[in-house]
Amino acid sequence: MTTASFTAAGFARGARRSLALALGLAPFGLIVGVLAAGKGLSLAEIGLMSGLVFAGASQILALDIWAHPAPVLAVSFAAFAVNLRMALMGPALTPWLERLSGWRLWGNLFLLVDHGFALAIAEGRKGERDGGFLFGAGFALWCAWLACSLAGHLLGATLHPPRGHPLFFAALAAFISLLVPLWRGRHDALPWLAAAIVALPVAHFAPRGAWHVVAAALAGGLVGAFRERQRARS
């Protein structure tokens, strides 16, 4: 097995390889910026949010339910539910991270997103184990995300779309687009149906916040885990 390392050459390779993926982040970053401008956040505030959070789905979700005062607890739980998938990414990247420490390890974990994870898995199958590659890819994606969200804020502040403008449907459209590639066939229907059945009444009786997102994630996850356990036994 190739020993994990962290080199400047790996950093440069990762940054170059992620440039095409950065283009895929651009629409989501613009959406986040426009939503932030519509919710009254300043350019500095959305810059801090994108720079520190660096999680498109969570940011879109938070901005979609943003209010004054902000529903911090509901947003936190919803973001936790949306980002549970990250708990599975870390173990999968053990060959890259097991020999790293300090800022190299924590920097890689901070910069980890779906695009960088997918790139690392593809490169890992070719024998790549340079932690610098993973860091370079994540850093380039982080820079692109920050730039696009700031550009989106400037765009939103210039256009001033009114409340209810079709542009704000982009948040829901973004989540739908994330779901499409996750569909694996009819055997996925039951967990998805369970999530919908739970989400609808929760959204009706608790319209403020994102409790319906949390409830749907838990319901769908539990049903999916039960189905997978049954399939493993058979």
Image: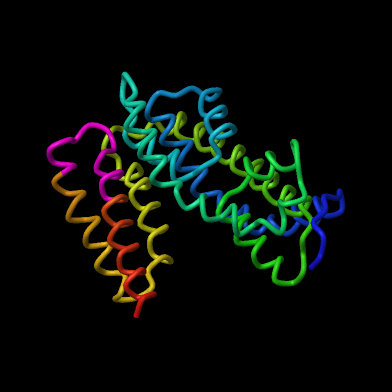
Q: Picture quarter containing residue 186?
A: bottom left
In percent of the image, x 78 and y 50: which residue is there? 132
Q: Quadrant of the C terminus?
A: bottom left
Residue at the extreme front of the image, as rendered:
233
Q: In the image, 44: left or right of 83? A: right
Say how the picture is coloured: rainbow
In percent of the image, x 53 and y 25: which residue is there? 43
In percent of the image, x 86 and y 48: which residue is there? 8
Q: Picture quarter containing residue 128?
A: bottom right
Task: From this view, report whether residue 217 is shown above or below residue 210.
Answer: below
Q: In the image, 207: left or right of 118? A: left
Q: Main secondary structure of the magenta part?
A: helix
Q: In the image, 191: left or right of 130? A: left
Q: Position of residue 122 (x, y in %)?
A: 66, 68
- Judge by depth and name the residue closer to the eye, 159 or 184: 184
Judge whether residue 46 is colored magenta: no
Residue at the extreme top of the image, as rendered:
69
Q: Position of residue 98 (x, y in %)?
A: 72, 52
- Picture mark count: 0
In percent of the image, x 45 and y 34: which residue is there? 156
Q: Quadrant of the N terminus?
A: bottom right
**What stretch of residues is rendered in magenta?**
202-216
Q: Position of residue 104 (x, y in %)?
A: 75, 41
Task: From this view, report whether residue 133 is shown above or below residue 103.
Answer: below
Task: From this view, report whether residue 150 is shown above or below residue 134.
Answer: above
- Judge by depth and name the residue closer to the eye, 223 or 114: 223
Q: Position of residue 139 (x, y in %)?
A: 70, 44
Residue at the extreme bottom of the image, as rendered:
234
